[in-house]
Amino acid sequence: MVEKKIDTYHNAFLFIKESLISIYDEQESTSIAKIFLEDTLSIGSYEIFLYPEHRIDQLAQSKILTGTEKLAQGIPVQYVTGITEFVGLPFIVTPDVLIPRPETEELLWWIVADQEGEEVCIVDIGTGSGCLAVTLSKMLTKANIFAFDISHNALTIAKRNAEHNQVKVHFFHDNILNPSSELNKLSCQVIVSNPPYVTIKEQQQMHQNVLKFEPHLALFVPNEDPLQFYNAICQYAAKSTRPKTTVYLEINELFGSETVNIFQQKGFTTEIRKDINGKERMIKAVKEQNCDLP
């Protein structure tokens, strides 16, 4: 029965898709099946449909079976394959890091458009997989990139991604919420971050595969203090001795005006942008001169 179901591209595709239909809708099941087969068989998704009767060997069938069992448990396909793409670059991902999202790509392009060709120091706060830091290092060849995270396991993945993409990033372990953070010794004119910003009460609106398998440390903040990371980042940026310190952040759409207000109160000029879905998801804050802290 197994061989009958997954002995060809077409049959394998149907087998995976039908295994997922109980937990995903039609469109997502189709997308996951294509992504999984692309990686497992090292083919383009078009080949599934162009050569539907192409036969699959026993070793590949075994990999498809094992992987599909994991997918049917709700494990994200990126964790099953162990790799994903971010603006076309390959990134290793494990449950120790968030899977990069399209919204973060939009933030990346904003930074690149502003900073291209500049000799700048950039620090990525809460780097996770390193998707921002590594891609910025790849695209902004004159930039000096620093990145840190509270998770040692995440840093291990980020370092592997820097090596895999052949870029130089200075990684270190730290916590922006720690008042005595070593980060205070580092002053960069560009600060980027996609910090945790999902409140606990928003969990009920999230897909189970995110809740069960992606790292809560990188996702959630307390209901009573949802902007704690933005406050800490603003405090850090306000201390910068660099001229025209610029901060780029991904934000929670529910707290756009509140996040902007944090920076405006410290003398930053701010700009908020909507993502491709029309949600307020990014801000840019610029400090023209030093801001006095209380």
Image (cartoon, grey):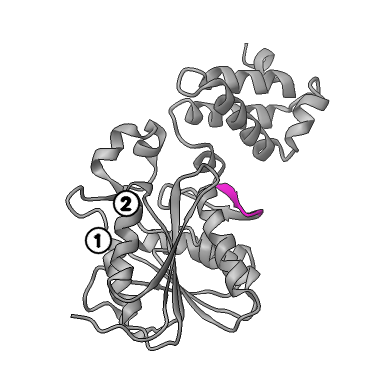
Task: Give the image location of residue 97, x and y in percent.
Answer: 43, 52
Q: Quarter of the image containing the N terminus?
A: top right
Residue 255, numbered circle = 2
| Relative to 269, residue 65 above or below | above
Task: Give the image location of residue 225, x and y in percent.
Answer: 20, 55
Q: Nearest to the eye among marks 2 and 1: give it.
A: 2
Query: Does residue 62 appear left or right of residue 189 in this picture?
Result: right
Q: What residue sits 41% from the left and 34% below the top?
A: 209
Which residue is label 1 attached to? 228
Amino acid carrying mark 2 in the image: Phe
Task: Give the image location of residue 278, x and y in percent.
Answer: 50, 44
User: What's the magenta region?
Assistant: 83-88
Amino acid carrying mark 1 in the image: Gln
- The secondary structure that most of the magenta stretch takes on is strand
| Relative to 63, residue 258 above or below | below
Write down the quadrant of residue 244 in the picture.
bottom left
Callout 2–callout 1 Cβ contact below 8 Å: no
| Helix, strand or loop at mark 2 | helix
Relative to the observer, which residue lies in front, 188 or 86?
A: 188
Q: What residue sits 80% from the left and 20% below the top?
A: 53
